[in-house]
Image (cartoon, rainbow, N blue to C red):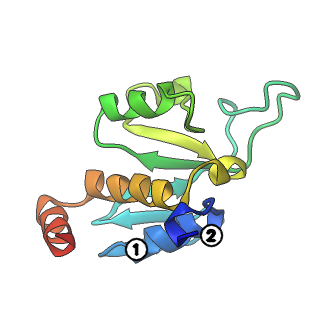
């Protein structure tokens, strides 16, 4: 099994995000990965809009990933084969949510693609162009 085809882990979120160029990390209680001062992946504080439907307890493991467009967001959250979701709090916000406890439902390769797309959605045009050119 190649590394990209194995189930993703929470540690992969950190490793992949950190490996992107020009990344800084606000490594407080909940890490925030930024490019050019703009977050692209962050670990969210428990909030009243993301709760266990049975117990009502706030989820403590929500990760936020920026996306390029509302269409990209909808394609991820409406695809029942993915663990991505959103809440009313994020209406109009170009991001999707994922519980860390469900990250293993993605392969490492799928997770990398989401993180790379998040980075591209927030990086400057020049940084994005340079990164894409270096990969081809």
Q: Which residue is mark 2?
A: 11
User: Along the line of sight, which residue is nearer the eye, 126 or 109?
Assistant: 109
**Could you tell me if residue 68 is visible in this image?**
yes
Count of marks placed on residues: 2
Using a 10 Å C-alpha cutoff, classify the residue at mark 1 as few (fewer than 14 neighbours), some (14 to 19) or many (20 or more).
some
What is the C-alpha distance between the residues marked 1 and 2? 17 Å
User: Along the line of sight, which residue is nearer the eye, 36 or 86?
Assistant: 86
Among the 4 quarters of the image, the one containing residue 10 = bottom right
* Residue 93, horizontal then vertical, whole percent: 39, 34
Label 2, secondary structure: give it.
helix
Among the 4 quarters of the image, the one containing residue 28 = bottom right
Q: Is residue 106 above or below residue 68?
A: below
Among the 4 quarters of the image, the one containing residue 92 = top left
* Residue 45, horizontal then vertical, whole percent: 65, 49
Using a 10 Å C-alpha cutoff, classify the residue at mark 2 as few (fewer than 14 neighbours), some (14 to 19) or many (20 or more).
few
Residue occupying the point 76% across, 38% down = 58
Where is the C terminus found, in terms of image quarters?
Answer: bottom left
Q: Is residue 84 above or below residue 22?
A: above
Residue occupying the point 57% across, 68% down = 12
* Residue 97, horizontal then vertical, whole percent: 54, 41
Where is the N terminus found, in terms of image quarters?
Answer: bottom right
Most extreme residue toward the front is 1
Label 1, secondary structure: give it.
strand
Q: Is residue 11 above or below residue 125?
A: below
Residue occupying the point 52% across, 74% down = 15
Question: Which numbered disc flags the more N-terminal residue, 1 or 2?
Answer: 2
User: Along the line of sight, which residue is nearer the eye, 136 or 12?
Assistant: 136
Q: Which residue is mark 1?
A: 24
């Amino acid at each position: 099994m190649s590394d990209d085809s194995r189930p993703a882990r929470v540690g992969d979120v950190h490793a992949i995000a950190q490996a992107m160029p020009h990344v800084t990390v606000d490594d407080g209680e909940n890490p925030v990965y930024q490019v050019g001062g703009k977050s692209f992946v962050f670990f969210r504080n428990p909030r009243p809009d993301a709760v266990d439907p049975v117990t009502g307890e706030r989820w403590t493991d929500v990760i936020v990933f920026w996306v390029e467009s509302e269409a990209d967001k909808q394609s991820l959250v409406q695809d029942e084969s993915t663990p991505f979701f959103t809440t009313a709090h994020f209406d109009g916000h170009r991001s999707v949510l994922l519980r860390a406890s469900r990250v293993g439902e993605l392969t490492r390769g799928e997770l990398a693609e989401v993180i790379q797309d998040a980075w591209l959605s927030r990086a400057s045009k020049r940084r994005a162009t340079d990164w894409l050119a270096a990969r081809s």
